[in-house]
Amino acid sequence: MPVNRSIIKCEVCESLTMVRTQIGYLEEIPIRIPCENCNILIEGELLVNSKDGTWKINFNNAEMQNPQKIEDKEIDYYLETSGELLTRKLIKNNGLDFNNMNFSPFLKNIDRMGHDKIIEFMKRFSSFINDIENIWPKIKRINQLWINESYDYIEKELKKLLPEIEFPMKNKLDFLRGIHKANIFFLWQGINTEKYEKKYKETFDNVDKLISDKPKKIGELAIYFGDEGLLELYEEKVLLQIDKFLNKFIYLAPVFGLQYYDEITQNDIRNKGITTTSFNDIKDLYIDSYEIIFEVYNLVMAFNNLEHRNDFNKMPEKRSDVTELSEFKNQSKGIKLKYLTEEDEEKFDSLLKPYLDNKIRNAIGHNSYKYDAIEEIIYYDPSRNEFSKENAKEIYLLDFAIKCYKTFENFVNILELIYQTRMIYFMTEGLSPSIEFDKYMEELNNL
Ligand SMILES: [Zn+2]
């Protein structure tokens, strides 16, 4: 795999940084470089033309230099970047031997992932990025038609994507089923598939068990949320948030790749850099996710209530003013968060694991943080006092990016629960899926 070597000059302080960028399968690689000297962020992108194998690189706040005219000792800093892989962080040039730096990020990661896995990861990621550009808009417009109840068009659009034998389109429940499958088929490419399949099966089994053990009561739960229009509302918000994630997915590439490592240690988190993103690129994802998760948590709580207390309305005994679900729904996020703890974990809470971190969320929300782009550390102060580095907690950018990515996975899980509940709601309205499974199996056997 080729490596691009450029020397850039900071437009502010004129310090020189040598940037080695690993070329992979991505055609557009975002690059975020902190200037160690004056602390500004240099943003750039490397554009690869996969047809002829050429590439070009653009930077804001920095000028490209002619390497022939610069001696090694004039270079102030050295940085490796990659669209997909973890890299070493920025280092100062105290007599580095640039001719002897043969190990590219790709070669170094081979050690950790193994050759086949690294190629699999890089190919899978770039194909997902292409699909986000080319296929996601087609699914997104079906989601919009669904939200706007334009059923005539939905049927036509879904037929373009799904086989009719498996997905006949005769009623609203068929549409829902088709739309959900189209979304999930697409999204599974972007998540840790093995983990997701386990969680998906768990959700499916847990709901299925409630359907067979408590059919009337789960029907009441679905009617409660369905009649108030909450299922549509939750679905719409979750899909919009998933869309926001997909738009920023390219920044999270190295995090997506972590699932391919045999092991990730605290040492990696501390020492490895992620050059595809800065804190600014992704911080809003976390804030917005937090808002939506706590709205949808009402539904998760109803399932917990039914599972553990045999009544979707009956809340766990934590507060005297919250005995029923309707009271819980009106509580602030801060209070709701107190129900989501490791100690009192209930069955459906696992959909939201790992739980959101309200300290980081609050600090970002109140602008009480500082980002050190060189060390890639976010200092945040959750107290409501003025920001001070002494009182601040710290988290590595890579760790924060992992939190963001896992929230994305949580949304995909939540989508499943909303889907299951909507299916039940439609069934209480007398609808049933038009697929005739016996006939379908027969046709499959004849293929
Ligand atoms: Zn500078």
Image (tube, rainbow, N blue to C red):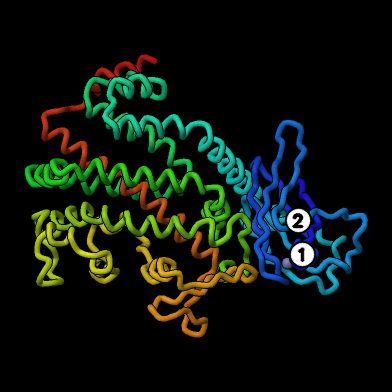
In percent of width and height, residue 213 lies at: 11, 46
Q: Residue at x 71, y 46 (%)?
A: 23
Q: Mark 2 belongs to which amino acid?
A: Arg
Whether residue 441 is visible to the viewer of this picture, yes or no, is: no
Residue bearing the label numbered 2: 20
Horizontal relation, residue 447 to residue 100: left or right: left
Count up the numbered dots: 2
Of the pair 229 and 207, the residue shown nearer to us: 229
Q: Where does ligand 1 appear, by image quarter?
A: bottom right
Q: What secondary structure is found at the residue carrying circle 2?
A: strand
Q: Quadrant of residue 343?
A: bottom left
Marks 2 and 1 close (CB-CB < 8 Å): yes
In percent of width and height, residue 232 lies at: 24, 40
Horizontal relation, residue 413 to residue 223: left or right: right
Whether residue 409 is visible to the viewer of this picture, yes or no, is: yes
| Callout 2 crowding tier (Cα within 10 Å): few <14, some 14–19, many ≥20 | some
Q: Mark 1 belongs to which amino acid?
A: Tyr
Q: Residue at x 88, y 65 (%)?
A: 72
Horizontal relation, residue 16 to residue 262: left or right: right
